[in-house]
Image (cartoon, rainbow, N blue to C red):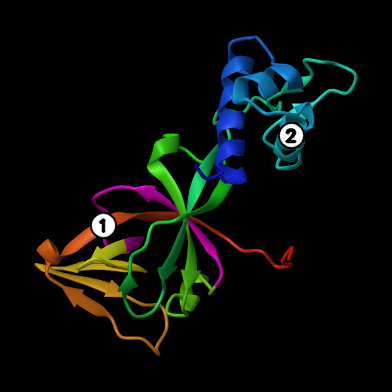
Amino acid sequence: MGRTPHGQTRHKIFKFVRQRLRAGRPPTVREVQQAFGFSAVETARSHLDALVEQGLLEKESGKARGYRLPPGGRERPLFLIPLLGRVQAGALTTAVEEIEGFLPVDVRGAEEDLFALRVRGESMVGVGILPGDIVIVRRQPTAASGDVVVALVDDEATVKTLHVRGGAVELVPASPHFKKIVVEPDALTLLGKVIEVRRVLEPTA
């Protein structure tokens, strides 16, 4: 059996620690090690340190049970959501769902309703969505005219602005170099609405 990707393991660890903290039973590093079957305690510690660096946890030094959720009266907890491959902002491209990792988000809604996609193409530059950006998407089967959406047309996915005109549905780019896509309503599957855009200005690698 292949190894579980670090991002998926860290996601599970975060959910485990969060559940314990909400129950008033902060776990120790060794308890995390035992819960996930790590051979070395340092493996558990490295995952927890990474969650602290991401801002998902805080650590009070000198305490075995020093991990806690960030303070501040947060009404909505941070979630880790899957980054699922890429979506075309241009011509349609075959949809492929492949988990690249997980991202922390702080948005309204259920954790399982959110996912992220990395953008390819330049058709949405007019609304500030550039190649390489990551869009956070809320799964929903409908959207209002004018919403930026991720849509599936005959098994091909794209990110565009949704326009509904009478009985016609248009997927409209935000660049004069691309044409709008006109589809029959029954040929369109809405994967979700784009609710956030993220951009890394200084790549880490």
Question: Would you identify the image quadrant in which residue 157 lies?
Answer: bottom left
Q: Is residue 188 left or right of residue 129?
A: left
The residue wearing badge 2 is 43
Q: Are marks 2 and 1 in contact (CB under 8 Å)?
A: no
For numbered disc 2, what is the local secondary structure?
Answer: helix
The stretch in magenta equals: 132-150
What residue do we see at 70% from left, 27% from top?
Answer: 72
Q: Is residue 164 above or below residue 101?
A: below
Taking the view exactly as shown, the residue that stands out farthest to the right is 62
The residue wearing badge 1 is 190
What is the three-letter code of the residue carrying label 2? Thr
What residue do we see at 58% from left, 23% from top?
Answer: 16
The magenta stretch spans residue 142 = yes
For numbered disc 1, what is the local secondary structure?
Answer: strand
Mark sitting on residue 58: none
Q: Nearer the viewer, residue 175 or 8?
A: 8
What residue do we see at 74% from left, 34% from top?
Answer: 43
The magenta stretch spans residue 176 = no
